[in-house]
Amino acid sequence: MKLKCFLQLIILFLLSFACSNICRAESIQVQEAQNWAESKGQEILGILTAEADEDKFIKLDEIIDNDVDLDYAARYVVGKYWRLMTDEQKKTYLPLFRRYTKGLYKSYSVDLKKGDVDFSVDKALPTKVGADVFCTVKINAVEQKVDDDSKGGVKAIFSLAKVDGRIKVRDLKIEESSLLRAYRERFYKMIHEDNEDEIDWFLESLEEIVQDNE
């Protein structure tokens, strides 16, 4: 696996990327945001470094269900095409996207031991909807070939918002690149270029991808 893909996979779970509905966001204190990020990061590191893969998958699925606003993320990545979907297509797409998200990490073999990954919360700054938390993720595994640009670790910024009393991530940037926007580009290509704007064809293609990942 290429180092860049490996780092993205680790950061995906360390930061539990998601999107929250801004109009429902509640205020969040900077220290609260830092504490949440540190606690959640260490929790996921503990899962990733567990010995049994079956236990990893069960616990990571629970984090995706509990800490990721998948319905909003699903609407975001299809953008304008969400309005073009029929109610029936939406009912098919939403659970399919949930399976797609869960299947992403299962398509890789994540073999990590304690000490292979360092995760640190550098600082947090207040925003209008919550707080931006700046983190560093560093891979220490001996077998990974790290280039000079990655030796200091990968910088990540994620925006936290509190929705219905629960802290969630609103947006995520890895080295200035938003993962959520990257997924929107991928889904737009699938719908427009690969399936000629035909939603039913897109859903069939997505189902095939999901089944392959599972």
Image (tube, rainbow, N blue to C red):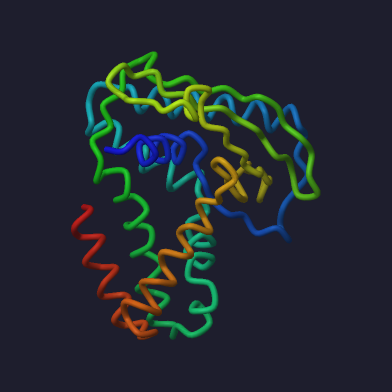
**Height in image: 134 above or below 70?**
above
| Residue at the spot 44% in from the left edge and 38% down from the top edge | 13
Q: Residue furthest top?
A: 115
Residue 94 at what x, y percent from top left?
Answer: 41, 67
Pick the residue in front: 153 or 125: 153
**Height in image: 38 above or below 210?**
above
Horizontal relation, residue 170 to residue 32: left or right: left
Pick the residue in front: 56 or 17: 17
**Height in image: 101 above or below 134?**
below
Residue 44 at what x, y percent from top left?
Answer: 43, 29
| Residue at the spot 26% in from the left edge and 72% down from the top edge | 205
Q: Residue furthest left?
A: 212
Residue 58 at what x, y percent from top left?
Answer: 30, 38
| Residue at the spot 68% in from the left edge and 33% down from the top edge | 33
**Height in image: 56 above or below 96?**
above
| Residue at the spot 38% in from the left edge and 80% down from the top edge | 89
Q: Which quarter of the image is occupied by the N terminus?
A: top left
Residue 66 at what x, y percent from top left?
Answer: 48, 45
Horizontal relation, residue 80 to residue 133: left or right: left
Report which quarter residue 30 is drawn in.
top right
Q: How many marks?
A: 0
Pick the residue in front: 128 or 36: 128
